[in-house]
Image (tube, helix red, strand yellow):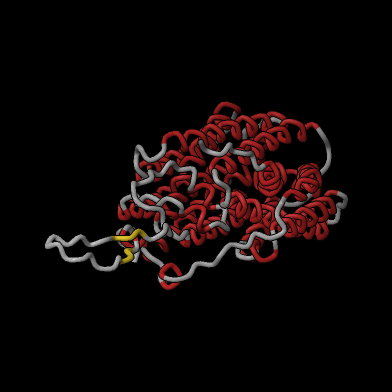
């Protein structure tokens, strides 16, 4: 009888506190533009600085959670979020707001890194990460429904700061250290990175893919208000519904699993996303704006889950998942500024057309990688063995099949030769089952 599953609520709460800032990016950028008198490009640059700071925290701290301890790093991230976002809320000085956004962004990234590392070590990481997505989407939807009715440039930043403050007491249940034995023997000696060409192509494509997504997301609020002529509360309702549709996308990706392979969801899904981006960017009314945003937010998490699953399948030790996820984080950080510059220079419809064309081009190499690698399944146990990066969470949710082979790192099985001529059996020889079941091309 299996042990009952327990819900890691402290990790779910920490996940929510870390991911809330990117989810609230459109209203944050719009509020800064209108409340502080910034240009569209300047407000987009502040959003990009916040996300870049968050991504930097992930780069710097992903390998240090085990050494420093989850509790200490989580508390550091929450303190930085409260101080940074809270300080930016209480001042109208632009340099102070920018500094607060950068400090708060680093805090969000720190909280996200700790949550992702610990969730990856859970017995059921898919369940924990899904609960985190549900939590942050619900909270962001609530903010989108309430903040537009209130004045002030920093209300969304204040919401993030208050969330971090509320999560603080739960960090007492986090471990002070998360030391894990380092790999030895053949696992440590085999340090060559497999599928280098496919991995590099996928990493470069993911950077551009994420940049296009967040270029639109960063200016979606302005498209709704200034081009579609909607009120801010109406735009908030559209975003809340779109986030709910995103949840359906996450659940749908898990239910669909590997039935269609990876090439079709990645290539076909990216083409659909390109059409949604063009539709949203050219919207002039509620119908077209809502249709584009809701359809886009439904398909986006489905494609993302398959992309990260593909990256994870390139290396059972998870190194390509980390590198591709890091490239995606850089694209996310550059997105708001890119969208602001393109829209300011050429207008929203042209920006949407450029982003859609870029996505169609990027879909080709991503689909080629999926076809070339044959959708190699992630070997059992690989998600828990690597840990330390958010990509592992999504890889665990893609429904990749578990072949009937021994788990990587499983104990060696004795093999006995049985002579047929009646002579005594020789001594047993150890046979490395993990080496015998290594995926093709993984050397």
In the image, residue 224 sits, relative to residue 64, either above or below, namely: above
The picture places residue 365, in percent across and down from the top left corner, at 37, 55
* Extreme-top residue of the structure: 287
Question: Which residue: 44% across, 71% down?
Answer: 185
Q: How many marks?
A: 0
Please give left or right for residue 353 compared with residue 70 in the image: left
In the image, residue 182 sits, relative to residue 249, either above or below, namely: below
Q: Residue 252 versus residue 7: which sits nearer the camera?
A: 7
Question: Which residue: 69% across, 37% down?
Answer: 140
Note whether residue 140 is visible: yes
Quarter of the figure that contains the C terminus: bottom left
Please give left or right for residue 360 compared with residue 47 in the image: left
* Extreme-left residue of the structure: 421
Question: Which residue: 29% across, 60% down?
Answer: 415
The picture places residue 189, in percent across and down from the top left corner, at 42, 73
Please give left or right for residue 138 compared with residue 163 in the image: left
The picture places residue 67, in percent across and down from the top left corner, at 66, 66
Q: Residue 284 versus residue 171: which sits nearer the camera?
A: 171
Note whether residue 342 is visible: no
Q: Residue 352 versus residue 170: which sits nearer the camera?
A: 170
Question: Which residue: 32% across, 63% down?
Answer: 431
Please give left or right for residue 125 compared with residue 239 in the image: left
The picture places residue 98, in percent across and down from the top left corner, at 77, 58
Q: Residue 337 versus residue 82: which sits nearer the camera?
A: 82
In the image, residue 23 sits, relative to residue 48, either above or below, namely: above
């Amino acid at each position: 009888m299996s042990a009952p599953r327990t819900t890691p609520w402290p990790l779910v709460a920490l996940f929510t506190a870390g991911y809330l800032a990117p989810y609230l990016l459109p209203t944050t950028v719009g509020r800064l533009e209108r409340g502080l008198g910034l240009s569209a490009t300047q407000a987009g640059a502040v959003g990009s600085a916040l996300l870049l700071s968050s991504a930097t925290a992930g780069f710097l701290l992903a390998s240090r959670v085990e050494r420093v301890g989850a509790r200490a790093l989580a508390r550091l991230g929450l303190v930085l979020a409260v101080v940074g976002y809270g300080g930016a809320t209480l001042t109208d000085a632009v340099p102070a707001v920018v500094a607060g956004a950068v400090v708060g962004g680093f805090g969000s990234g720190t909280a996200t890194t700790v949550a992702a590392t610990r969730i990856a070590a859970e017995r059921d990481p898919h369940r924990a990460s899904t609960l985190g997505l549900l939590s942050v989407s619900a909270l962001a939807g609530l903010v989108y429904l309430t903040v537009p009715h209130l004045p002030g440039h920093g209300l969304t930043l204040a919401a993030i700061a208050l969330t971090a403050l509320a999560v603080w007491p739960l960090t007492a249940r986090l471990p002070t250290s998360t030391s894990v034995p380092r790999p030895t023997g053949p696992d440590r000696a085999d340090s060559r990175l497999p599928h280098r060409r496919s991995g590099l192509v996928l990493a470069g494509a993911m950077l551009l893919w994420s940049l296009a997504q967040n270029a639109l997301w960063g200016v979606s609020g302005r498209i709704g208000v200034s081009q579609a002529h909607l009120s801010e509360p109406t735009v908030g309702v559209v975003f809340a519904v779109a986030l709910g549709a995103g949840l359906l996308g996450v659940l749908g990706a898990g239910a669909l699993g590997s039935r269609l392979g990876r090439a079709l969801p990645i290539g076909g899904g990216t083409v659909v996303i390109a059409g949604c981006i063009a539709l949203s960017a050219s919207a002039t009314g509620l119908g077209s704006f809502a249709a584009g945003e809701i359809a886009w937010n439904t398909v986006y998490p489905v494609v993302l889950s398959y992309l990260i699953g593909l990256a994870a399948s390139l290396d059972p030790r998870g190194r390509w998942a980390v590198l591709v996820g890091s490239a995606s984080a850089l694209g996310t950080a550059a997105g708001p500024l890119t969208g602001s510059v393109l829209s300011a220079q050429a207008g929203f419809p042209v920006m949407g057309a450029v982003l859609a064309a870029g996505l169609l081009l990027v879909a080709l190499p991503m689909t080629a990688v999926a076809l070339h690698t044959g959708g190699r399944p992630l070997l059992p146990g690989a998600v828990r063995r690597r840990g330390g990066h958010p990509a592992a969470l999504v890889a665990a949710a893609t429904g990749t099949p578990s072949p009937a082979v021994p788990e990587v790192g499983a104990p060696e099985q004795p093999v006995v030769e049985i002579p047929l001529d009646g002579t005594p059996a020789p001594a047993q020889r150890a046979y490395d089952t993990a080496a015998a079941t290594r995926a093709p091309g993984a050397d």
